[in-house]
Amino acid sequence: MLIFNCTEAASKFFSRVHKGKKITPVDTNPPSSIIEDDELSGADEQWLVHAITVQRKHVLLVIHVQTRYCLIFADAKKADTEDFVDRFVDRWVKGIVINAHHHDLGQWLNPELMLARLKQTCEHQRFYRRSHRSAQKHIDEIAWIFQDKVAHTGSLPPDEITAMVFDEQMNDTPRNSKGAKSYYFPNEEMALHWLRHYCFLDDVQLHAAKERRQQMVREIAALEREAWLEKYEQENSNS
């Protein structure tokens, strides 16, 4: 089940008034006041959702409480939970799969298992009015960066590809949270979370996948440095 814990702003975003009556999918009585205290099945995912307004458009910021993996949806349709869930699932899956292949994790992906588990997870959704102080701090930081970027470019992300690039940049930013031994990267944490819960890797397989991913990160960084140095040398040789 997808559990969307909504801030006050997000709760208002998902609500509407019809014939003088408030209609909302957001339950103000969650099973517990603290997200981590919920009794979950292996197919449940906890997300925190916040809403802001940028250039008079609604923007939703969604962050995975466990891994701090985030997704940002610009020009969201107010009070349309069906559209939100559809966009959310599509972006989440595409982002995970693209990032996994980019870091050579394809050998550990099992499409049949993934789709079956994903269907189980996404079949039902719950919206609760509930907050999470630590995750909210990360959302506030991401919101500030997003607003600053829009101010510089002059527009919201024009398409899904541009939006996914911003997601990737935010998820490649080191985070820290209570209980973590050190800083971590949300994209790596989500990749490992996905491999464990959607491809059912055991600890040995998960360790191998993590090692391979980190190796690819180093190789990609080395190639980027080499390309930068080559460009720098060319620019300086022509001056």
Image: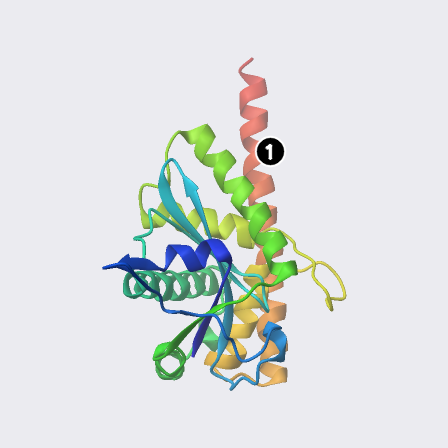
Tell me, what colour scheme is on the image?
rainbow
Q: Given the current orientation, which residue lies at the most extreme right position?
A: 181
Q: Residue furthest left?
A: 19
Rendered location of residue 151, percent (x, y): 46, 30
Q: Quadrant of the C terminus?
A: top right
Position above or below: 163 against 217: above
Report crowding for label 1: few under 14, some 14 to 19, many 20 or more residues within 10 A (C-alpha): few
Quadrant containing the N terminus is bottom left
Q: Quadrant of residue 179?
A: bottom right
Identify the amino acid type marked 1: Leu
In the displayed orientation, state which residue is furthest to the front: 20
Q: Residue furthest top?
A: 239
Q: Nearer the viewer, residue 36 or 72?
A: 36
Q: Position of residue 49 (x, y in %)?
A: 48, 60
Q: Is residue 73 left or right of residue 19?
A: right
Residue under the image location 54 percent in, 55 percent down: 171
In front here: 236 or 155?
Answer: 155
Residue on which the image places disc 1? 229
